[in-house]
Image (cartoon, helix red, strand yellow):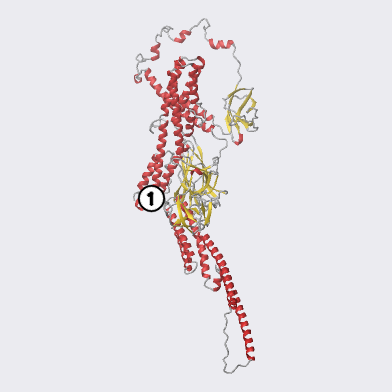
Amino acid sequence: MIPAPNARISLILAITFTAAALVLPSSARAAAGAPQTCTVGTTCVIGEYLYDDTYTPITTVDICSLNAKEPDGDPYITAQNMPPAADGWYSHSFTAPATTGYYRAEVCCSPDGEEMCLDKSFQVTESSTAPSAVDIADEVWDYSGRTLDNFGTLVTDIWGGTTRTLSSFGNLVSNIWSNDSRTLTSSGVDTSSLATKTDLKVATQSASLGDLGTIKTTVNENRLLLEQLVNKPIIENFVEEDTTADLETKLKDTKTVSSQLYANNQYIASKTSLLASRWYGLSEKQILDGVMELSNLLGEESDASSDNSIFGQINWLRKSWDWEVVDSAYSQAKTIANSLNSVQHQLGSYGNTKLAYSEIRNLASSTSSFSKIVGSIGDVSSKKTLFGKLNEVEDLAQVLDSRSQEADKVLAGWKDNSKKKNIASVISDLVKKVLAVNRVPKAKNIFAAIDKSKSQETQLKNQVLGAKAVVAANKLLLARGSGKPLTNTWLEEGSVVFKSLVTNPSRLITQDVPLKYYLPPEVTKESIISTSDGLEVKYDTEKGQYYVEGTFKLSAGESMTLSVTVDEGIWEITDDQLASLHTQAEELAKPLEKTSYFAQGVTLKSDIDASLDKAKGLRDAAVTPEQKIRAYREANIELNSAKEKIDKLKELATQAGATGTLFGFVGGAQTLAVWGLIIIMSAGFVFLALYMRALGVNKAIKEKGGQVKKGKGKPTAGIIPEVKKRKFQFGKLVQVVLPLLIVSAVSATASALIARKVILASVEKQQAALSQPQVLAESTTPTPTPSEETAVGGEDIVKIVVPKGGTINIRKGPSTSDEILLRLETSQDVTRIGDEGEWVNVVFDNPTALESITEGWVNEKYVEEPQPEISTNDAEVSGSVIIGDTPTGWLRVRSSANTSSEEVAKVNPGESFNLVDSSNGWFQIELPDGVTGWVSGQYASVE
């Protein structure tokens, strides 16, 4: 019989309500029962069992209550507590009232604070007595003249016609059809004739197929809904969503699992065909062993996704993807399992029978059908097989990558005026291409939400950024699965706008979608201009950053675009700032001309100009908001370095200005040297004066003595007195010269020691002022100084090499059990700050985060030593090696050309050594004592 339309609707509603009746809170489940009937005056018991997720009875008191209303709606039982039993049975007993009718009742329980209610309506009826045999006979035979051995007028009453008997229809046909021309062979209903059997069959099949399609759709939806509810955790923790799902890795794993599934099925098909072809030549034991082997390879429906069985592999695919072809493979695998079980049963119970042989033939047919569902690796994306679907997704991923590259190309040439002529049409085509392959529900709303009040250039750039966001959301959707809610955040211009796409991709159920992300550390409460409804900006005291949070209930297939607008001025470096610093440096350098500080001043000013020019270049090269934020951070480091060197210039200018006066000169930077020389020279003059005075006194005494002797004798007339020839007196010469030599030697020695100390102190101070490390990214934590054993004298830059087509895990600690911070997809340079065992601690710029840089651990086998560019060829071994500036103020000389070799010596910046050899970015030099060693070419150059 063809079900009436009302019957079909009733069937669909019955299935829907049955599924809805099973919807329970995540903390407890109750077994729903049918409404019960209570007889007036008897004891009526209303109860329900209550279990937790592990089906352990809940026996907590005072958590369940009963409420009931009389048929007219007045309260009958209100908040009646239901005590529990040891088996989780909560019940209440009462005497059924005299008023009959339908009593609406519900049992409400609140385990763990989550309330659930269940319909427990009951019906009260009057008591009834069993009828007697006389009553039954009267009801059955209540007709005059009708007894067990006499029908009376029964036949006449039935046939209603004198000519109608049990052997003749009489005028029955004409009475039924009321028209002699209406037969069972004409289908013309319009001509008052009946439809044929074929017409009825076609109509029945058409209606049945329509009903079955509707019922199947409803059942599938209810099944998915129930799975969502059953698997829902008791406690839901909304943590920050992992946005680093690796689509490429997932596709690679899917291809591996699909290939294993294909190989296993081919083995089952081959083994089944072999058993069928040699059925009568094999013993029952051999056949049974073969069937058991196939059964083990097939596995069980409950196999985990990690099990190496067909069901395990299918369950992995079902968990990873929501493809219909995977569901078809699962159904066919169950058919194969049923055939195997039937064969085992026949063999075990009846032996090698024809029925068992028939089942093995059916098994061969089932495996053939399974092979058609799986397909082969060469299937094109349009083929409805597992490999066809896999290739379809791979093609889609490649198209998405291509669209992302097109968007990057547009942004890369944004400041090229020659490419702006047709930029609007190029961007329009790009948006159309992205939307053509889009799988995210209502993703086009992203472009509708672009602020039309901004300039035309800003709107066009935001369209490109929106296209990149749609591509990223699609890749995230493919990697996570279409049933799970997802969020994707990106930046647009118009100040700096943090846009978020919140999506419920499920086609069946409403879901709560949490959103949480951290704003850059430069953002303050005052710099936030506006936020979308439903979003809250909160402060994380541990990180010292503001974050955005909100939860949104989205219907099936619904998406929302949310935004937080931040003042872009907090990431702005103006031309006035740069010009002001340039002017300060120039004005401070002028007073140093024609002074002993001129060389230091020129060096500092050159470094300042270089830092400011680099900051300006970073700022001007940025196109997207992310690039501008990162450029600001790098440029800000350069500005801070320039400001520190300007302070050094101020000190030099102050010292140079003070040397214009005697007291200023004496009190200047050379205080110790000047005072030392003055004291030594003064002491020398004092000793010299005392010595000369002593010589003068001795001479005067001798002259007086000579005059006394001369006066005693009278000179002889005419005789010329004999003049005695003076003899050279060596002793007097020694007396005069020796003190002078001693004083000069002492003065020279003391002056040399003082001058050496002053010069060394000045050199060290100058090196400390000029040797500032150049950092290219900002970090929220200070970078540790290289250790004494591993430092080469500068920032230790190494490279993380990512294998082609793979990723490298950056972990929180030096172990594979530590949390994965992110996965690097491309090779990049990082700063090495330490190591532990086989792990290297690195600091690097995280391109997926909006806040600062990241510190983490990576296995040393993926770390490659730097290969710096050097000014000479490795084959060239002539010339001198000049040691450059290093952050540590020195550079290690090692026994071999690597950082793990033994230290030979340390050399200072500015020193020059003979070049002996060069290899892999290292220079071999000869030290003054003849020892040779290797220095890193990163901090040395060849002249």
* Residue 864: percent from left, percent from top: 48, 46
For residue 485, above or below residue 408: above
- Of all residues, the one furthest to the bottom in this rendering is 717
* Residue 838: percent from left, percent from top: 53, 43
- Of all residues, the one furthest to the top in this rendering is 149
How many marks on residues?
A: 1
Foreground: 21 or 195?
A: 21
* Label 1 sits on residue: 413
Quadrant location of the C terminus? bottom left
Foreground: 943 or 22?
A: 943
* Residue 38: percent from left, percent from top: 61, 23
For residue 194, above or below residue 65: above
For residue 632, above or below residue 724: above
* Residue 684: percent from left, percent from top: 59, 74
For residue 586, above or below residue 866: below
Left or right: 535 with respect to 405?
A: right
Quadrant location of the N terminus? top left
Could you say whether the residue bearing mark 1 is in a helix, strand or loop?
loop
